[in-house]
Structure formats: structure tokens, C-alpha cells
Image (cartoon, helix red, strand yellow):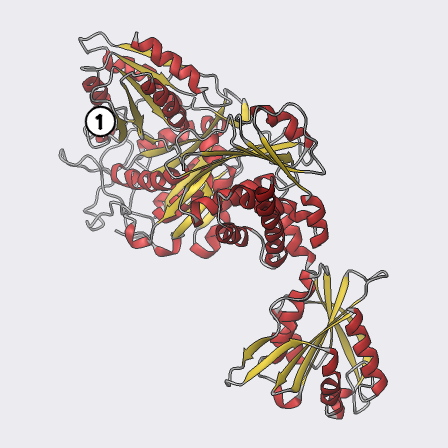
Amino acid sequence: MKADPKGVLTGVHFMDGDHAACEGALAAGCRFVAGYPITPSTEIVERFAARIPKVGGVFIQMEDELAASIAIQGGVWGGQKVMSVTSGPGLSLMMEHLGYAAMTETPSVWVDVQRGGPSTGLPTLPAQADMMQIKWGSHGDYEIIALSPNSPQECFDLMIKAFNLSEEYRCPVFLMMDEVVGHMTERVNIPSADQIDVTERKWTKKKPGEYKAFATTPEDLVPEMVKAGDGYRIHVTGLTHDERGYPAMDVPNQAKLIPRLLNKIRNNVHKLVDVRMDGCEDADVIVMSFGITSRVATAAIDAARAKGLKVGHLRLIICWPFPVALIQQLARTAKAFVVPELNMGQMVLEVRKALADVDRKVKVISVPHPGGTVHDPETILEQILEAAR
Amino acid sequence: MAPQGYPHTLALRDGTKIQIAILKQEEGKALHAFYRALPEEDRMVLKEDVRLAAWSERFLAKVAEGSIICLVATVEGEVVAEGSLYRTFHGWTRHVGEVRLTVGPAWRRKGLGRALATGLVKIATDLGIEKIIARVVENQVAAFHIFQRLGFMKEAVLHRHVTDLSGTKRDLLILANDVSQIWSTMEAMVMDFEPGGGA
Amino acid sequence: MAKTEIRVGGLGGQGVILNASIIGKAASIYEGKHATLIQAFGPEARGSACSAQVTISTEDIAYPYVKHPDVLVLMSQDAYNQFAPSLKPGGLVLFEEELVTLDGRLPEGARAIGIPATRFAEELGRRLVLNIVMVGFFAGVTGLLSFESVQKAVKDSVPKGTEDLNMRALEKGFEYGREAAATK
């Protein structure tokens, strides 16, 4: 399906990541946003609120992030594509409802413009320290998808991808921005609406009475969806439920439901690999990065290559699910992974996990940072040189 | 600095080509001829007795000193409409300009008034004038719409302030356009600072 | 053309960000180059230090920060004091000559050209257009952006109704810059 032209600001723009993210959401068909303002994400919803009189849609500023994160889900079951936008402290408040979205398979996009933490931390300065929180922050077992843009253009492009993935897998999808990318201004090309593919919601063709809200087949673990007002009687609950959606709080139903929710994603990890690789095939050292750190790492990698070292760059676009198989494959030839991130070591843990089953000895070097500003390329270069020894 | 873009040719809806230009001193006679030819009911709503030579001299003197900027619309040398921006260089209303328009009876409802008014608003803005007013009698509907479309709002009503030809007292509306608002948008753009650095 | 790294510095309220934004817009939208803009605000509001980093390149810009600028555009003494030492040797300083006094902290071989931009802005009718004069000056001296490109970028960036005055400010800065580059 192609994008609705009303929401597509076709043209060449010089705009920052926050604004581009908003345009991406509009282009993807997002027409309901409930949010609560928090630096450095506020511009996204401010722009959304300013744009919707022309585009159509609703923005509600809720009383807090708890309310925002559940209001959007009401919007989904009312038939809309939705997002909520926040930063660290707000994300922490959204954790319960994140679990609800995962449990009820409510397609939704969650935007986190990461800032220094923990707690109130550094409201106006960048970090990348919420990466583990989105994966493990809500209670129980659940899977999410997360994307990480490193430019305003990617904020636009990956926002559309996020919406499409959330409809395809009926799960929460995160767009993990950071304060630098959010406030960085670059050229953003917004194509015409007929050049933008948007994934339609998996509307059922079954009739009321036939349709079961959470019924799936072994081949297709994603159930079909309906919306309020279409004449279907449905029940949506965060309690463990059966195929009809009604509470079924027993061991057999838990044993059926939870693995399916996880396997929806896990069985498709090969389809959910999105990375940019440069020079990894014959590299001795591979730098794995994501978001703004990838642009800083490039400077370090160029300097290392200038010294004659064989350094590859692996940039994660989809960070969750983590590309375990790819890491294991690269570990067959590389000597070391260097992982710079604007946190004290989060995604590096996934690299170590992935390599636990690999026979070969591969060094994994974390280049942490408490946040507040980006790495100095020198720091990353030092670790690359160290890794190459 | 002289207003830019003049003289230029305006094509009316019916195809007639009108020349719009800044009044030159030597065109004073043609302008006066235009005013003397106005029917009485139109002259009665003008502030001054435009039939008098003295008026014409005063007008041209003010044009020369710059306190009146006059745009004339001509067809083959004949003045068919005129619009002026009145301003003072000193005094308490030195930031205010007033726009006055007169369109010859045969040339109304062709878009001339609007063209002149638009041009004068732009000239005023470029000169740094912060507020423009126009005085419109309550039954001058066409004039009211011209200014309304240019963003003028009704600011004051002087009741029973104008006597028309039949002796009827009419309300005079003061319409105003605060153009300093445009510059306040630009002021916001150069502010540079990011408010709300907390939470 | 490789990368050109530019830092614009001044006091909050002078239009530092707008200035840098117009440079970036002209380069990336109207000249088809790549441009990245990053800004930094002072801790308080109006009147405190503000700077913006703009990188222009014919190729993709990876590392977006400007540590050692090729060109400094400075509108306050504070900005000069802070950033002058970071200029690349042989780099160019464009400064508002009534607000900035140069001294020995400029590196080897640096070129410095001043402009009375505030005076020009006031003569044109509004102090507010100081930063537009500086944009024109930047384009005129460096030749990095064509006049048409900056003209379009300014038209695109300023509120409707202010274009004329801003255009004149741009022209004034550009002509002054062109002349200055030819003679100095």
C-alpha cells in the first residue's frame, strides 16, 4: 500500500532529526499521538500537533507518560496507527504499558530520544543508555524490535520502517534516537507519496462469529486484527488469554501464548537483520556501533585505516532483535570487536553473549561513555589500536 | 531607498494594462485633473477639498519631502486611480502610516484598489513603519474588504463622524495592521537560546 | 572540494543559529552539497554564548563535529576568545569589527577580515538583520556558496513580509565580502 499523500511533505528539506521523525510518522500514516512533553523529544510532538490540522489526526497531551502509553493503545484498537514520544524518565513510566502492548499484540511505535541518565540526569545532552531497558524494562518475557537512526534522513526513513514492522509483527517497535541526532540538521529528502510503501494493518476478512482475536496458525504466528465499530465482539486483556482473547489464567494457555509472542520475532530474526557493513569481510578489528556513535566511530576507523590497519565497521540499524548469527559469522574471521556506545556497556553484552558459543578466541572491547556528549574519536581509535595488537 | 519594483504594469481581469508608478512632480497636473473630475459624492468623503490648487501644491510638497508616498495608476497617461501612504518623520505617531485610496468611478471593481493597497503596505513595511491604518466609512464595503484581506483589523469606531452628501452622519472605522508582528516572528528566530533546559 | 568546517559564534539573540542554518540550507538544498548543522546553547537565555557548527562537503559527512574550523564567523568578543585558538592554521576569521577585537591568539597564517555588520544592519533599518549581513559576508569572502543559493536560502528562512530588507542585508554583506576578499 502506498502512503496517504496528505501526510507526505514531499520535497527536499533542511531539517533536524526530531522534525524529520515527525514527518516520517505522518508519512507512515500515524494519525493519533498521545504524549507528555520531555526534553529533548518535545519538538516531535509539537510539530505533530502543528501539522495535523492540515493532515488530519489527533494529538492529546496526557497528564503523564503512564496515561500516554496506554492512550495510544486505545487509539490502535480504534483503528489508528499510533506513536508515543518520550525520553528516559518518561520511558521508565511507560514500562507497564509496554508490557501490555506486547501481551495484547498492539502495534505501536515508541520513540525514545535518549538523554543522559539515570533519573533526571542531563535533560539536554545525549546518551544511548536505554538500550537494555526497552528489551528488559517491562516485567515478564517479551520481544520488541528497535531501530537506531544516525541522521535526520534516517529518522524519517526508519520511522516509516518502524510503523511497517509494528503492523507486520503486531508488537511494540522502538525508534531509539538520541539528543544529537534529534537536534542535528541535515538534508532530508521526502519522496512523493506513491514512492513510500506502508504496511497495512492485518485486518481480518473473517466475519463476526468466525473471527478469533488471537488465533494463529503454525506458519503465521501473527493474529489478524479488527477495530472498534466494525461489529466484532472482542476482548483484549493483559491477563494470560486464549484465542478468543478472554482471560485463561492457567499453565497450558501460558505455555501456548508466551512462546508464540516470542517466536513471532525469534523465528524471523533472519528477516530482521538490518545493518550497514563496511570492510568487515577481511577485517582484523570490527567496530560495532549504532546511532550517533557510528558517525564518531567513522572518524576513528578512517584514522586507523590510514595507519594501515584492516578495520571493518558494522553499524546496527535494527538493534533488537540483536543479529546474533551475523556476529557469530564475523567472529570466524575477525580478531576483535570494539564496541563504542554512549553508555557504560550495554549492547557489548550482546556481543559477548553471541560469542559464548563460538569456538574461536575473539576479543570484545567495550568503549563506554557515561553520556552527555559523544566520544572523542581518539578514544575509539586507541581501543582499535589496542584491539589490533 | 526608493521603493523597488516601480513602475510596473498591472493586467486587469478584463485585459486592460495599467501602469502603476511612483508619482513624479511633473505628473502633479494629471493627478489634480483626476481629482477635480471625481463626482461630488466621492469628493465628500475625502479629507480635503481636492479641487483647490493649494491642495495640489501642499500634496506635491509632501511628496517631495517624503511624508507622502504616492502611487498612481495610469492608462495611456491618464490617472485612473491613486493610493498614498501618509507618514510623519517626527512626533508621537512617527511609527504609523496611513493608507488612502481613490479609484475613479469607471475603474472600480477591477482589482485596482487592491493592487495599490498591497503595494503601499509593502512599501510601508520596507520603510520600517510598524503600524498602518486606514480610515473607511461604514458603508465603503469594497474598501473594507480590500484592507481586511491585507490583514487589517477593525480597531476603533468613531461614531457619526462623517457627514455624507445627503447630510447623513456615518460611522468612521479605523482599520489597523500591526506589521511589527512580522518582525517579531523574525525576532523569535534569532533568539538562539533553548528555553526549558530542565525536566 | 573536501570538507569545509565552519563555526559560527556569538551571543544568544544575534541569530547565530539562523546564520548557520542558512549557510547549511544554501549548501545542501540549493547547491546539492552535503551539510550538517549542530548547535550549542549557553546555559542561560539571551545574551549568553551560543555557537553552531556547520560542515559543508561534496561527500557524505560522517563525523559531524567541528573541532578545528576552517572558517570562523564571529559576532561577539566572547565567541572570539573561545574559538579563535581552535582555528586551523591558515584558516579564515570573519568577524563583526565593532564587536570583536583581534589579538595574538589567532594561529599561524590565519586570515582575518572584519565587517561593520551591525552598522550596516542599522543603516538598512533593523539591527535584527545583522546575522543576514554576516551570511552575505561569508558567501562573498569565501566563494563557497553562490549568491543565488544564499539568496534562495534566506528567502526560504525569513518570515513573509521581511524578505526585501533581508535581501538588501544579504547583498550588502556579499558585496562588502567580495571586495574585501579581492583587496585583502
As drawn, is B9 to the left or to the right of B139?
A: left
Considering only vertical position in the picture, is A272 above or below B55?
A: above
Callout 1: chain:
A
Q: Quadrant of the C terminus of chain A?
A: top left
Q: Does residue B71 lie above or below C3 as drawn?
A: below
Tell me the quarter of the picture where residue A217 sits. top left
Decide: few, some or many residues near mark 1? Use Cα within 10 Å; few <14, some 14-19, many ≥20: some
- The image shows a total of numbered marks equal to 1
Q: Position of residue A275 (x, y in %)?
A: 27, 29
Give the percent coordinates (x, y) of residue C168. Answer: 62, 55
Q: Foreground residue, C56 or A265? A: C56
Q: Amino acid at mark 1?
A: Arg
Q: Which residue is mark 1?
A: A266
Q: Is residue B3 left or right of residue A82?
A: right
Q: Residue at x 23, y 10 (%)?
A: A356
Q: Residue at x 70, y 44 (%)?
A: C118
Q: Which residue is at the front of the view, B17 or C86?
A: C86
Please state the horizontal and vertical placement of residue B185, each as a whole percent of the image. 63, 51
**Furthest residue in direction left, as rendered:** A219
